[in-house]
Amino acid sequence: MREGVREIKWHDGLDVFAGKLIVDGEVYAVVADIQNVERLEVKLLRIGIGATTAAALVSLLIAAWLSRVAVRPITTLVNQLGRLDPANPRTLHVPDLKTAEARLIAAAVDGYQGRLSRLLARERVFTDDISHELRTPTSVIATAAELLLDDPTVVGVARERVERIARAGRRTGAVVEALLFLGRDDSLSAPVIVDLQTVVNDTVEVYLPLARAKGLDLLVECSGEQLITAPQGTASIVLQNLVENAIRFTDHGSVRVLLEPGRLAVEDTGSAWPEWTASAF
């Protein structure tokens, strides 16, 4: 063995470090068994890896717990917001919220609900007032026009003008009723049983004078009572719009309202709409 330090591995697996030094012709040798040191290194390495893994798991668990604690007030607030009804506002349970941020959000939502409630109240009052203010003059116009049309002395150009006033009055009344209906809180949330045959008969009765004024035949073909469940008034508004448009865009011929089981149609002999209207829809 030359001078110096080297690692020696024996056939039996023994692993040692050997050192050789020659001083003044004297040979000095040192042999050290390092297997215990290597085993200690491996053990320490395993302990370090295990401790690091455990610390990472503990950190993840703590982070998950902290995130749940931090998010829980927001989740509670979101659940309360999901149960709010604009028509029946109620105060959020602010004391149940554990964080100042969530309480601030809840207070802001409560303030918004208060403003919304006051706005809805003003709209209800406005709707009631406008209902009276609009229905009264339209009724007066319609009644006066009917009285003039019943007067045999009203002929010629004057009668044509009165008929135009009557048609405009009916149209205005229908528009007012539709707007007031859509403005009500329960316009789209109170379905009832509607007899379409009655709706058809009432609509035809309203628009029959308009059809006759244009020289059109307004026909009805009903196969019997047809009951549907729909918000009150919507069926009448839809059918009135269809019949009025059919009469407006028909210059000669007829307009037919067809009521069959499962089908309500308005057919006319007027010209088709221009091709560009298809893209508009």
Image: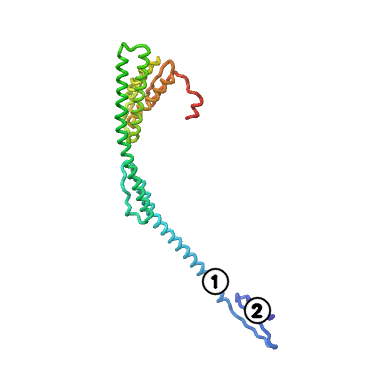
Residue 13 drawn above or below residue 59: below
Q: Based on the displayed image, in which of its 4 quarters is residue 236 positioned?
A: top left
Is 4 or 183 nearer to us in this picture? Answer: 183
Q: Residue at x 29, y 26 (%)?
A: 136
Residue marked by disc 1: 42
**Quadrant occupied by the N terminus:** bottom right
Residue 23 drawn above or below residue 225: below
For the rendered model, the colour scheme is rainbow
Q: Callout 2: few (<14), some (14-19), or many (20+) C-alpha neighbours within 10 Å?
A: some
Disc 1 + disc 2, Cβ < 8 Å: no
Q: Amino acid at mark 2?
A: Val
Query: How far across and down, in percent of the image, does residue 149 sit?
Result: 32, 15
Is 210 or 118 nearer to us in this picture? Answer: 118
Q: Callout 1: few (<14), some (14-19), or many (20+) C-alpha neighbours within 10 Å?
A: few
Q: Earlier in the sequence, mark 1 or mark 2?
A: 2
- Which residue reaches farthest front? 158
Q: Secondary structure at mark 1?
A: helix
The label on residue 255 is none
Q: Secondary structure at mark 2?
A: strand
**Drawn side of residue 23 relative to residue 216, left or right:** right
Q: Based on the displayed image, in which of its 4 quarters is residue 241 positioned?
A: top left
Is 210 or 271 nearer to us in this picture? Answer: 210
Query: How far across and down, in percent of the image, does residue 251 sit?
Result: 44, 17
Q: Amino acid at mark 1?
A: Val
Residue marked by disc 2: 5
